Amino acid sequence: MKFAIALFSPPHAPASRRALRFAEAVLAGGHEIVRLFFYRDGVYNASSALVAPQDEADLAAQWRAFVSDHQLDAVVCIAAALRRGVLNAEEAGRYGREAVSVTAPWELSGLGQLHEAAQMADRLVCFGGD
Amino acid sequence: MAKSLLLICRQSPWAGTAAREALDIALAGGAFELPIALLFMDDGVLQLLPDQQPALLEQKDLGANLQALPLFGVDQLYVCRDSLARRGLADAALALPTTPLQGAELPALVARYDLVMTL
Amino acid sequence: MATLHLLSQSPWRQPLDSVLRLLGADDGLLLCGDACHALQPGSDAWTQLRGRTRLYALEEDLLARGLAAPEGVTAVDYPAFVALCVQYDKVNGWL
């Protein structure tokens, strides 16, 4: 089956790790992930500016590795990202901000990508809440 | 044929950006002409109260986004009767035309849609 | 269509009333995170929940919390979680 997976919680939240473990199990089970979509506080998972304490799990780094290793389509909602200060070079330049925290493999785009993924997939699974 | 989506909106318009970011999902889907319905439930029903003045709290008017829903083709709007009643709003005039649901009508609504998100 | 609902918040933070109102006869409920505390025997949440629907709990969350799955509740690992999502027609994660 084709899965679309959305995440609404930040990297230090239980939902982020849960979503990642679920996504890993989806691929291990022989299914396909058509897109990962990060919305609301989920956009923080795409930030390369986060510094996780040495003795804590670094979910942002784990997500980045997962997306890269499997060459997944990983989209971050641009409106949610902007208001949370999660910017790529283009947006940082556009708004005159110094901090660039989003680079490949993450892509900033609109909510239309969430809808497209939900339409393409057999299952949409959303993680958040905690 | 496009998959239909039910958005269950449970957040107060005064509780940060959650309510607005949920409506943005509805409006984005409407812009793509997807079949989308909204169920306002729990504190989500507070979004439907008329005569709110968000500008007093330096907030944007969510009501404008709500009024835009039918313009984007999102006109299947439902509200949970129990949620209204618990909040003393059983007889309140609501800012949008909605179909009130109760009891078994709620799971029946959920069952009808291809996709559901509870926000 | 049968829906698998996902809850992850403590039932004393996010009361079960709302999800119970939405549950259809063919639906199921998977408890993750602090929602697993709803399985605590003797709790008001368990009294409200037991026997109401097909119940699943994420095994790692049960073990981490020292909770046991009561009879009738299926503990699932991540592969089984994925299988449930395939089995049910759609998944409604409460956000």
Image (tube, rainbow, N blue to C red):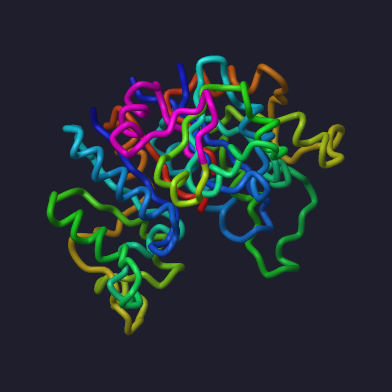
Rendered residue at 26%/58% (across/down):
A63
In this rendering, the count of numbered labels is 0
Rendered residue at 50%/25% (across/down):
C28
* Left or right: B81 in relation to B23: right
Residue B36 visible in the picture: no
Residue A54 visible in the picture: yes
**Residue A116's spot in the image, x, y percent?**
31, 38
Q: Is residue A56 above or below residue B8?
A: below
**Residue B46's spot in the image, x, y percent?**
73, 46
Q: Which residues are magenta?
A: C68-95
Rendered residue at 57%/34% (across/down):
B38
Q: A39 or A1: which is nearer to us? A: A1
Q: C56 or A61: which is nearer to us? A: C56
Q: Is residue A106 above or below residue C20?
A: below
Q: Residue furthest bottom?
A: A98
**Is residue A98 found inside the magenta-colored segment of the image?**
no
**Residue B93's spot in the image, x, y percent?**
82, 37
Q: Is residue A29 above or below residue C95?
A: above
Q: Quadrant of residue B90?
A: top right
The quadrant the C terminus of chain B occupies is top right
Q: Quadrant of residue B77?
A: top right
Q: C71 or A48: which is nearer to us? A: C71
* Left or right: C59 in relation to A108: right
**Is residue C80 found inside the magenta-colored segment of the image?**
yes
Rendered residue at 35%/34% (across/down):
C81
Q: A68 or C80: which is nearer to us? A: C80
**Residue A104's spot in the image, x, y percent?**
18, 64
* Left or right: B27 in relation to B58: left
The quadrant the N terminus of chain B occupies is top left
* Left or right: A19 in relation to C38: left
Q: Is residue B100 above or below residue A87?
A: above
